[in-house]
Every structure is written in C-alpha cells, then in structure tokens.
Amino acid sequence: MHIRLTHTLLVLALTLLFPIAGSAQKLTSLQTSAKGQGTLNVSDIDKHKITSVLVILKENGDAEITLYTELQLSAKGTWSIDKTPSQGIDLKITGGIVQGGGTGTGKLLLRKDGKSIKKLTIDGSSADGSKISVDFTANNPAPSKSQ
C-alpha cells in the first residue's frame, strides 16, 4: 500500500510539474547579430546589398536594428511577440530608415535556439512616400565540431 501511495504521489507531482518544465521560455530582451545576404530597396531605384544585421530588443519593448551595407543604416521602433513565438517577432518601425514620419512593419524569425537570427523582413514607407523594403536571410550556422 505504501509503495502504491508513493507511486501515485510521484505521478501526480510529475504531472503538475511537466507543463512548467515543458513551456517555452518567454523572451524579454535580446541582442543578436548575423552575417548573411539581403537587400534594402528604396522605391525600386536605390538598392543596397545587406551583408549583416544587428538586432537589439530591449525589455521596455524598444527595438534597434542596424543594417550593414556599403553604409551603416539604422531603424528604431518597437517589438512584440504574438501568442505563437514560432511565427516570429513583430516589429513596428518608427524611425531611422523610415525617418520623418514614415512607418513600417517587419518580422524577425529566430532559429530553434531562440537567440540566432534566421530571417529579417521589413516593409514601410518614408514621409515622402518612398517605399522601403528589407529582406535578409542569415547564413546557416557552422556545423559544430565534435572532438
């Protein structure tokens, strides 16, 4: 009887703890960068090749994005995560590449580790109506060397 009660309590404890242990860790801030390939298009006239990006997501909801082309361009805005983090991090761009009252939205997709950039896209317009788009895909991570 004692073994059955111990077994029942153990099963109950594991059942109660499993949802906590199995839940995804909530992202509160992030600083990450990646090398890769992409383009920054401004009204289909001005095109820049993106070689790397730096993304800083702050705890207060602010976002800073730096695009490395032949120039270094920045964007500022806010970030949020939908109920389904696998769908990416939503970005609202309010300054920088869409300066002067321009607006934009974007999506940051992370790799399975939840820390590395997989893809970054932004669509927006500047105050003068110029369309702006960013499409960046990070290089695949180097395979780990097992020794």
Image (spheres, rainbow, N blue to C red):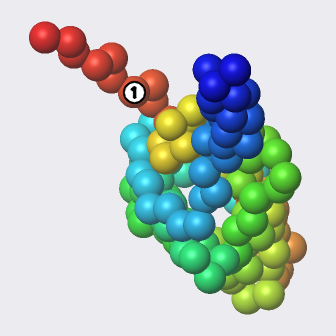
- Identify the residue at image location x=81%, y=75%: 103
Secondary structure type for disc 1: loop
Foreground: 2 or 75? 2
Q: Residue furthest toward the left?
A: 147
Q: Residue furthest toward the front?
A: 1
In the rendered image, which quarter is residue 27 located in? bottom right
- Identify the residue at image location x=45%, y=30%: 139
Q: Is residue 133 left or right of residue 142?
A: right
Residue 1 % position (x, y): 69, 21
Q: Residue furthest toward the top?
A: 147
Foreground: 19 or 147? 19
Residue 30 visible in this rendered orientation of the protein: yes
- Identify the residue at image location x=83%, y=55%: 82
Residue 122 % position (x, y): 73, 55
Residue at numbered disc 1: 141
Residue 71 drawn above or below residue 33? below
